[in-house]
Image (spheres, grey):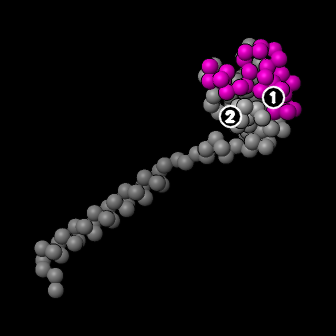
């Protein structure tokens, strides 16, 4: 038979375990999970790119402004090396770059942005 002190200690340990479990459940139930950028459909992004972007950006180049291409060093140099930055410029346009918010859905823009980053990482090969 367990003495009273040991029984109280065991109850405290069990209570702490239950409290920790409740806290974990509350934390997980209130946390919003977002899909990573890789959840974008890069195959769809490739199709969209070939229709809407390749005219000026064939193989990641830029026929209008040579230095502002879609190669990894240029994307880094101009702080365009993230899904957010690329989706912003595709959505709203900038300088000679047309805005596509009225032509493409948000998901299509996400897909093409993911495709651009994927290709830049592979040096457009």
Q: Secondary structure at mark 1?
A: helix
Question: How far from the left and from the top, in percent, is residue 64?
Answer: 81, 14
Q: Tell me if residue 87 is in the magenta stretch.
A: no
Is residue 12 depicted above or below 55 in this figure? below
Mark linked to residue 34? none
Q: Residue at x 83, y 17 (%)?
A: 63
Q: Residue furthest bottom?
A: 1
Q: What is the quadrant of the N terminus in the image?
A: bottom left
Answer with left or right where residue 43 lies relative to residue 34.
Answer: right
105 or 17: nearer the viewer: 17
Could you tell which of marks 2 and 1 lies nearer the N-terminus? Answer: 1
Mark linked to residue 59? 1
Q: Residue at x 77, y 15 (%)?
A: 66
Question: Magenta segment, which residues?
Answer: 49-77
Q: Quadrant of residue 46?
A: top right
Q: Residue at x 28, y 63 (%)?
A: 16
Answer with left or right where residue 6 lies relative to residue 90.
Answer: left
Q: Which residue is mark 2?
A: 121
């Amino acid at each position: 038979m367990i003495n009273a002190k040991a029984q109280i200690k065991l109850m405290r340990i069990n209570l702490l375990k239950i409290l920790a479990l409740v806290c974990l459940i509350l934390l997980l139930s209130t946390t919003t999970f977002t899909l990573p950028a890789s959840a974008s459909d890069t195959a769809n992004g490739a199709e969209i790119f070939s229709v809407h972007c390749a005219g000026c950006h064939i193989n990641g180049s830029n026929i209008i402004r040579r230095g502002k291409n879609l190669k990894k060093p240029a994307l880094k140099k101009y702080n365009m090396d993230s899904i957010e930055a690329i989706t912003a410029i595709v959505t709203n346009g900038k300088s000679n770059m047309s805005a596509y918010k009225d032509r493409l859905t948000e998901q299509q823009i996400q897909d093409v942005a993911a495709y651009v980053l994927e290709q830049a990482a592979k040096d457009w090969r």
